[in-house]
């Protein structure tokens, strides 16, 4: 179960990695909106792929909706922390950077806890064959990310 939660979190967070590159301070709101749209599209693409891979049934849709909404909300919170760091990176001291990274790590930790709470009931309701697919998918993704 820990692997599933870690992989779910890691995979939806990878969309937030786009925000880690510092943006120029003169970036227009249009460019920022485009970046937000790109991040949102990446999260939605991941949610849809995961839905298909897990073979979410119509009976599981309400529980899946909770998982998907948790993933969306967590991505926003993590992106905010990353964006906050990006905004200060050019003038940040070592201490500022450490604090900003701490905020990103805390947002990640909070997201993992929220995702675990949202995913656990869905996973518990899955039949054994579907759990096995989920276990294999997430174990494979975790292994691929560690290479």
Image: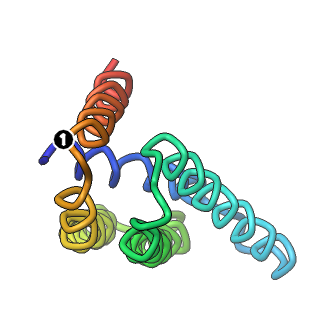
Q: Is residue 104 left or right of residue 40?
A: left
Q: Is residue 81 left or right of residue 87?
A: left
Q: Position of residue 124 (x, y in %)?
A: 17, 59
Q: Quadrant of residue 128?
A: top left
Mark 1, other Cα within 10 Å: few <14 / some 14–19 / many ≥20 = few
* Image point (26%, 53%), residue name: 126
Helix, strand or loop under label 1: helix
Q: In the displayed image of the protein, which residue is found farthest to the bottom?
A: 29
* Image point (55%, 73%), residue name: 87
How are the residues colored? rainbow
Q: Position of residue 27 (x, y in %)?
A: 79, 72
Q: Position of residue 86 (x, y in %)?
A: 53, 66
Q: Nearer the viewer, residue 53 or 88?
A: 53
* Image point (13%, 47%), residue name: 1
Q: Position of residue 103 (x, y in %)?
A: 28, 73
Q: Would you name the residue on which mark 1 appears?
A: 3
**Quadrant showing the C terminus:** top left
């Amino acid at each position: 179960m820990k692997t599933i939660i870690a992989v779910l979190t890691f995979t939806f967070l990878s969309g937030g990695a786009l925000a880690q590159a510092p943006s120029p301070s003169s970036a227009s709101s249009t460019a920022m909106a485009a970046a937000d749209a790109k991040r949102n599209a990446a999260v939605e693409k991941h949610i849809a792929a995961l839905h298909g891979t897990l073979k979410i049934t119509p009976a599981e849709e309400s529980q899946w909706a909770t998982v998907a909404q948790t993933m969306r909300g967590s991505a926003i919170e993590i992106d905010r922390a990353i964006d906050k760091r990006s905004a200060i990176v050019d003038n940040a001291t070592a201490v500022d950077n450490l604090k900003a990274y701490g905020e990103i790590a805390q947002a990640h930790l909070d997201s993992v806890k929220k995702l675990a709470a949202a995913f656990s009931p869905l996973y518990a309701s899955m039949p054994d064959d579907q759990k096995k697919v989920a276990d294999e998918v997430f174990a494979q993704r975790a292994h691929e990310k560690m290479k």
